[in-house]
Image (tube, grey):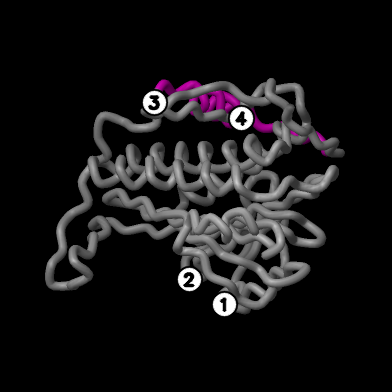
């Protein structure tokens, strides 16, 4: 039986256009489009990947009840996606956070967003973005003289692998405490992001470091590229919560570092939001 944590959440109202956007977005019948040749197609795909990842994290970690999700399928995987109109306030709040992140993604401002426990950090989920007009190159045989354009098939394979690895990781972490405090932080590309910019539902935050209770273990979950975007996903967890993974050696990309996670540029602009 899945655990449901009680969350106290303040309600906010999105404009009708935003509500329509998220409803249409969550009614997709498949993760992949027929092609990813345009920037708009690439943007839609990256949004879907983000929605799948965040929804999978909250579902597999038992944060919200079953009726907060709808089922979608990718190959043999049943993927749970958060419903925009669910009656669980906390789940609705996370969807609104995602809409704010989408706004920054559309403007190509956001560099990283981090989804984590607010107070004593025991887990964090980091998503990094890169943008290009010409399209990223894939390094073949780790030789920079041997490069080729990323294909739709490359993107599909990388996406399925990322989702499978995320599923494996979530299912092998220790159970969360009975109460969970969540926050989402956005870090920006300062050279192009206006100083006054804040996505809908976010406020200005501090570019502080993330501290775990003890030693943190980091997992490089995967990287997905299109011709216009690159998405990298990393999961961090307190060392004592990943003993099953370490014993089974499920993810060989893991590495241990001290509990302090450097935030990148110390002057970086940050937005945040949280629910309790």
- Residue at 81%, 47% (x, y): give it: 177
The residue beneath circle 1 is 265
Q: Earlier in the sequence, mark 2 or mark 3?
A: 3
Q: Quadrant of the N terminus?
A: top right
Frontmost of labels 2 and 1 is: 1
The answer for how far apart the CA atoms under marks 3 and 4 are is 15 Å
- Residue at 18%, 54% (x, y): give it: 149
Q: Position of residue 169 (x, y in %)?
A: 55, 49
- In the drawing, what numbered circle is on residue 30? 3
Q: Earlier in the sequence, mark 4 or mark 2?
A: 4
The residue beneath circle 4 is 82
Q: Earlier in the sequence, mark 3 or mark 1?
A: 3
Q: Earlier in the sequence, mark 4 or mark 1?
A: 4
The answer for how far apart the CA atoms under marks 4 and 2 are is 33 Å
Tag 4 near tag 2, CB within 8 Å: no
Tell whether 138 sits left or right of 208. Answer: left
The answer for how far apart the CA atoms under marks 3 and 1 are is 37 Å
Q: Quadrant of residue 32?
A: top left
How many labels sit on residues?
4
Looking at the rendering, the stretch of residues picked out in magenta corresponds to 9-29
The answer for how far apart the CA atoms under marks 4 and 1 are is 32 Å
Q: Quadrant of residue 3?
A: top right
Q: Position of residue 126 (x, y in %)?
A: 56, 57
- Residue at 39%, 39% (x, y): give it: 45
**Camera-nearest residue between 80 and 226:** 80
The residue beneath circle 2 is 191
Tell whether 269 sits left or right of 161. Answer: right
């Amino acid at each position: 039986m899945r655990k449901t944590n009680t969350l106290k959440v303040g309600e906010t109202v999105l404009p009708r256009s935003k509500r329509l956007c998220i409803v249409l977005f969550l009614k997709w019948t498949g993760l992949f489009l027929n092609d990813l040749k345009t920037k708009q197609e690439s943007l839609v795909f990256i949004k879907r990947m983000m929605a799948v990842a965040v929804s999978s994290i909250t579902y597999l970690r038992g944060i919200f009840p079953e009726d907060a999700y709808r089922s979608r399928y990718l190959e043999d995987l049943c993927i749970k996606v958060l419903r925009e109109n669910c009656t669980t306030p906390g789940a609705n709040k996370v969807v609104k956070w995602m809409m704010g992140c989408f706004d920054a993604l559309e403007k190509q401002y956001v560099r990283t967003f981090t989804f984590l426990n607010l107070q004593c950090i025991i887990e964090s989920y980091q998503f990094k973005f890169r943008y290009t007009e010409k399209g990223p190159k894939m390094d073949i045989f780790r030789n920079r003289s041997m490069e080729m354009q990323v294909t739709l098939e490359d993107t599909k394979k990388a996406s399925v692998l990322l989702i499978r690895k995320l599923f494996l990781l979530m299912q092998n972490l220790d159970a969360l405490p009975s109460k969970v405090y969540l926050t989402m932080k956005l870090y920006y590309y300062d050279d192009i992001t206006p100083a006054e910019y804040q996505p809908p539902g976010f406020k200005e935050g501090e570019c502080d470091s993330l501290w775990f209770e003890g030693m943190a273990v980091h997992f490089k979950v995967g990287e997905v590229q299109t011709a216009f975007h690159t998405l990298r996903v990393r999961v961090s967890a307190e060392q004592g919560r990943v003993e099953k993974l370490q014993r089974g050696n499920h993810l060989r990309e893991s590495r241990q570092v001290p509990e302090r996670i450097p935030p990148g540029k110390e002057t970086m602009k940050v937005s945040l939001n949280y629910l309790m």
